[in-house]
Image (spheres, rainbow, N blue to C red):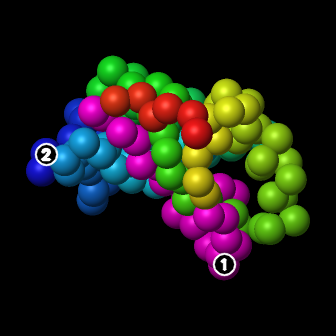
Amino acid sequence: MKYHRSERFFEAGLPFSEAVTVGGVLYLSGQLGNAPGQKVLVAGGIVAEAHQTMQNIAHVLSKHGLSFDNVFRAQVMLSDMAEWGAFNAVYVSYFKPQRLPSRSAWGCSGLALGARCEVECWATVSEVLTEL
């Protein structure tokens, strides 16, 4: 097991690791639509937050030589399920249509920083997953 806690997370005082590698899987902590290294969400509502969330995920993946092609599982939390469609429109744009990961999504009564969305991902580090 290896814990990955970047300087950015350390300086922001966040009480968790960005990701942890166990075996051949990189488990990413939930990402929000905050500006990198800051505890401030980007302006612009669910679409802007969703894009920033996915860009934050891409940043963590790239630090480990990975991309969205390696993601096989995602968990999505939304503060308002009425924004599910708008979130999905952004979310799917980061994946190839034949490589959509398995996913759960649920509504919650509150997210850190007052975020509208949070996404956790699991990615394979040992190989890129193949299509069925």
In this rendering, the answer to whether 37 lies above or below 14 is: above
Q: Position of residue 97 (x, y in %)?
A: 72, 32
Q: Amino acid at mark 1?
A: Ser
Q: Position of residue 18 (x, y in %)?
A: 32, 45
Residue 71 shows which numbered tag?
none
Residue 2 shows which numbered tag?
2
Q: Residues within 10 Å of mark 1 (few under 14, many from 20)?
A: few
Task: Judge depth for marks 1 and 2 and give the one in front.
Answer: 2
Residue 117 lies in magenta, yes or no? yes
At horizontal 27% and vertical 59% (from top left) the residue drawn is 15
At horizontal 62% and vertical 35% (from top left) the residue drawn is 99
At horizontal 77% and vertical 49% (from top left) the residue drawn is 87
Residue 87 lies in magenta, yes or no? no
Q: Residues within 10 Å of mark 2 (few under 14, many from 20)?
A: few
Per the rendered image, the range of residues in magenta is 104-126
| Residue 5 seen anywhere in this rendered image of the structure | no
At horizontal 67% and vertical 28% (from top left) the residue drawn is 96
Residue 109 shows which numbered tag?
1
Q: Is 131 on the left or on the right of 22, as rendered? A: right
Q: Position of residue 120 (x, y in %)?
A: 48, 53
Point out the tag, 1 or 2, that comes first from the N-terminus. Answer: 2
Secondary structure at badge 1 equals: loop
Q: Where, by quadrant of the figure, is residue 132 drawn?
A: top right
